[in-house]
C-alpha cells in the first residue's frame, strides 16, 4: 500500500476506510458521511484529487512523501527504521522521504548514524573525504538536514555505480 508499494492511485474503498476509522476514533459521537468528507478533502484541501470514479491520488508527490515520512517517524521503533533503511537506502524514489524523516525527528543523531552505517557498506576510497564532512553533521544538530542529504545523495550515486559496473 502507498509509497512503499509504489502505489500512486488509491481506491475510494481504502480511503473511505481510513476516514471512517479516523472519525470513529476521534469523533465517535459525530454523524458523518464518508463520501462527503472525501469530497471536502478534495475540494477544500487539495491533498487528494479524484483521477476517475472511485480512484484518488495525492495532488503532488510532496504530500505523499511527507505523509510517508511522518508515518515512519510517528510509528517508528528501531526495527521499522532499520527495515525501511535496509530496503530503501539508495533508492531514488525514497530520497526525499528519508530526508524528511530525518528532519521530523526530535533527535536525528541515531537516524543519521544509521544512514552513515548503510553508506559505509557502499563506501569507496573516493568518497571518504565527503563522508568525513557529512559525519561532522552528526555532531552538530544544525547540520542534520545537510548530513542526511549528503549521505543519501552519495548512497544513490554509489548504488547506481555498483549496478552499472
Image: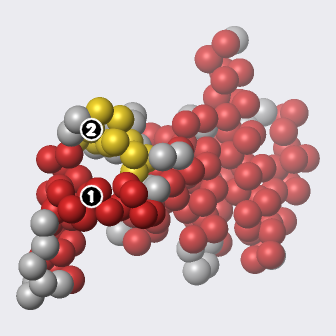
Residue 7 visible, this angle? no
Place residue 52 in its image quadrant.
Answer: top left
Secondary structure of the residue carrying tag 1 is helix
Residue 62 visible, this angle? yes
Residue 77 picture location, percent across and down = 38, 68
Q: Quadrant of the N terminus?
A: top left
Q: Which residue has dot 2 on it? A: 55
Q: Nearer the viewer, residue 134 or 128?
A: 134
- Classify mark 2: residues with Cα within 10 Å, few (<14), some (14-19) or many (20+): some
- Classify mark 1: residues with Cα within 10 Å, few (<14), some (14-19) or many (20+): some
Q: Quadrant of the C terminus?
A: top right
**Residue at (68%, 39%) from the top-left corner?**
155
Q: Nearer the viewer, residue 83 or 49?
A: 49
The colour scheme applied to this rendered structure is secondary structure
Q: Nearer the viewer, residue 96 or 121?
A: 96
Secondary structure of the residue carrying tag 2 is strand
Q: Which residue has dot 1 on it? A: 38
Q: Earlier in the sequence, mark 1 or mark 2?
A: 1
Amino acid at each position: 500500500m502507498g509509497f512503499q508499494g509504489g502505489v500512486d492511485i488509491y481506491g475510494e474503498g481504502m480511503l473511505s476506510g481510513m476516514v471512517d476509522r479516523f472519525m470513529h476514533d476521534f469523533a465517535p459521537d459525530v454523524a458523518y458521511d464518508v463520501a462527503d468528507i472525501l469530497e471536502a478533502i478534495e475540494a477544500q484541501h487539495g491533498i487528494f484529487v479524484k483521477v476517475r470514479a472511485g480512484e484518488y491520488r495525492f495532488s503532488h508527490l510532496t504530500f505523499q512523501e511527507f505523509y510517508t515520512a511522518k508515518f515512519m517517524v510517528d510509528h517508528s521503533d528501531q526495527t521499522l527504521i532499520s527495515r525501511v533503511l535496509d530496503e530503501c537506502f539508495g533508492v531514488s524514489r525514497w530520497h526525499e522521504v528519508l530526508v524528511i524523516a530525518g528532519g521530523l525527528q526530535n533527535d536525528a543523531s541515531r537516524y543519521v548514524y544509521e544512514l552513515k552505517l548503510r553508506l559505509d557498506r557502499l563506501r569507496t576510497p573516493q568518497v571518504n573525504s565527503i563522508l568525513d564532512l557529512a559525519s561532522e553533521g552528526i555532531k552538530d544538530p544544525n547540520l542534520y538536514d545537510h548530513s542526511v542529504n549528503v549521505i543519501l545523495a552519495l548512497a544513490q550515486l554509489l548504488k547506481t555505480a555498483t549496478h552499472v559496473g
